[in-house]
Image (tube, rainbow, N blue to C red):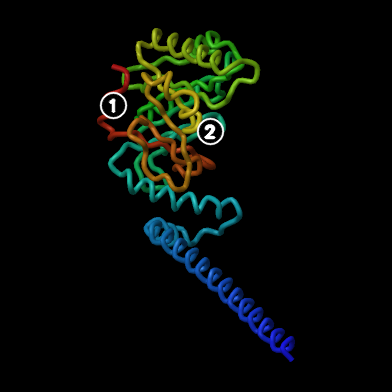
Amino acid sequence: MAKQNYKRRTTTTRKSKKKFSTVKKRLIQLISVIGVGLIFCAIIYHYRNGLAYYFSFKSDKVLDKEAKEKSLSDVRNYQVLKKNGDKAIGFDVSEYQDQIEWTDVKTLDNDYELSFVFIRATVGKDRLDKRFEENWLGAKENHLIRGAYHYYRPNENSIEQAELFINTVRLEKGDLPPVLDIERLPENQSIERLKIGLKRWLTMVEVHYKMKPIIYTGERYYDDFLKDEFSDYLFWIANYNFYREQMKEDWLFWQFTEKASVSEIKGNVDVNIFNGDVEQLQFITKE
């Protein structure tokens, strides 16, 4: 009889523990769902202006997969531009944008005036951008402040790369400083050798144009390899992270998106913000 009573008490305790465990698990699930919901609502509230802008003016679009992806970037683009409305806005192009009707290039997404453009001139030690000449001339005729950039190949001779750029680009009064675009790591040399090559290119170009070049790179590349040893140069930083909406103080230019719409240019375009207004931008151009 004592054994029966003992077994009944044990069974009751186990059932109570199991019931408590189930309730606890459901409570944790409920809290998690509420937490996710609150985060989602906070995101919607934060981007409310961008969402309102997109759905008010673009709801007539038929969205395929690419357009749906772009719609998210449109929301962020609007948010970034709104927070940086006092700064000069520009873009950059290469032969990949195909032929551009420069006389009609005026605005970003038909709303924001464009003030400047960076144009790819050269690649490595032996390649010219196929549309550099026409883009260079078109930008000037359209009264855009223009700048030229060189895409640096880490595994090619830096002197030859600098010579190619110098022989290709003729800067005039009102043009922006030359730009060195470095994005890749070397395959057959050390990081130290890479830095030596970059400094040689920068020095040659600065001596020729009598203007200190700007360095373009991604934020992580900048932090990991360039920030300390190239601190006496100004940087143009690429960062497309959804959460970043303002540029850092030590960035001269910020390429905040690669998925923007510029009037009369086919496909997506990289868009940049200068850390100042148009008057301040003109201050750094060639005299």
Looking at the picture, tell me which residue is in the foreground, 95 or 274: 274
Q: Residues within 10 Å of mark 2 (few under 14, many from 20)?
A: some
In this rendering, the label closer to the viewer, 2 or 1: 1
Location of residue 24 by image quarter: bottom right
Q: CA distance from mark 2 to mark 1?
A: 27 Å
Marking on residue 262: none
Q: Position of residue 31 (x, y in %)?
A: 50, 69
Q: Are marks 2 and 1 in contact (CB under 8 Å)?
A: no
Q: Residues within 10 Å of mark 1 (few under 14, many from 20)?
A: some
In the rendered structure, the answer to whether residue 72 lies left or right of residue 139 reads right
Q: Position of residue 66 (x, y in %)?
A: 59, 50
Q: Residue at x 48, y 12 (%)?
A: 201
Is tag 2's residue or tag 1's residue first in the polypeptide sequence? Answer: 2
Residue located farthest toward the bottom when viewing the structure as drawn: 1
- Badge 2 amino acid: Gln
Q: Position of residue 184 (x, y in %)?
A: 57, 25
Q: Which residue is mark 2?
A: 99
Marking on residue 282: 1
In the rendered structure, the answer to whether residue 159 lies left or right of residue 271 reads right
Question: Dot 2 lies on which element?
Answer: loop
Looking at the picture, tell me which residue is in the foreground, 106 or 53: 53
> Does 63 appear above or below 187?
below
Q: Position of residue 14 (x, y in %)?
A: 66, 78
Q: Residue at x 45, y 42 (%)?
A: 262
Location of residue 277 by image quarter: top left
- Badge 1 amino acid: Gln
Q: Residue at x 51, y 16 (%)?
A: 195
The N terminus appears in which quarter of the rendering? bottom right
